[in-house]
Image (tube, helix red, strand yellow):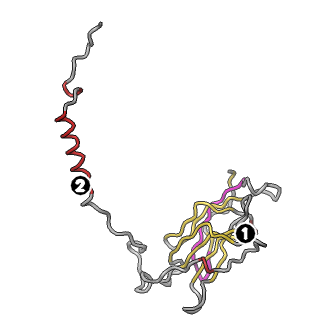
Amino acid sequence: MQQSVVPELAHTQTSAMHWVATAAALAAVVAGTSFLQPDAATAAQSGTKTHSRAATDPAPDPAGVTFPLDCGQVEPVVLKKASGDLDGDGHPETVAVARCDAGMGTPPSGVYVITKGTDATAPPRVVATLVDPKDRYSVTDFAVGSGAVTATLLGYSSPEVPNCCPDEQQKAKWQWKNGAFVRSTPSEAHSV
């Protein structure tokens, strides 16, 4: 048997005292983290003005909305939703990505801005269509923040490209300007 060139190190041998010290140190770390908690999350962004009702105003629920989708025998389904004050009036709007609930394939999506009804008893309503399903886009990377709606749109270079396999990608951003939602990103397509 050949002897090791490296001398034995004292710290490579564990003892019961070593395990007790390790367990005590770990317990102290776990106990210490229970005292450290992050601040409560809020919807208001720092440095922005909020109106007194905005904090208590709930965003419209897209569940009661009639979307401008022609789905035939199937119902529309909301895939994604996000809320924020897009027009600066102190009341949140909801933006929903919706499509027909098909059993197979990937039907195109629509992106809709929803606001409260005209009075307290009226249901929420669609006030703007940012992406029309007729344009054959699927929507990914969808978000609402800083008064803007952003999304990645997956589309098709020609009508012959099957719905399963989009071959173009666009980044899109909409902001409320002069009474309308304005798309402010380049519309050039990129291959996927």
The residue lying furthest to the front in this view is 16
Q: Identify residue for label 1.
A: 133
Q: Is residue 173 magenta?
A: yes
Q: Is residue 7 above or below residue 19?
A: above
Q: Secondary structure at mark 1?
A: helix
Quarter of the image holding residue 99?
bottom right
Question: In the image, which residues are magenta?
Answer: 167-181
Q: Crowdedness of circle 2 by 10 Å Cα count: few (<14), some, many (20+)?
A: few
Q: Amino acid at mark 2?
A: Ala
**Mark pair 1, 2: CA separation:** 53 Å
Q: Secondary structure at mark 2?
A: helix
Q: Is residue 38 magenta?
A: no
* Residue appearing at x 74%, y 59% in the figure: 104
Q: Is residue 169 above or below residue 177?
A: above
The residue lying furthest to the left in this view is 17
* Residue appearing at x 22%, y 30% in the figure: 14
Q: Position of residue 35 (x, y in %)?
A: 24, 60
Horizontal relation, residue 80 to residue 29: left or right: right
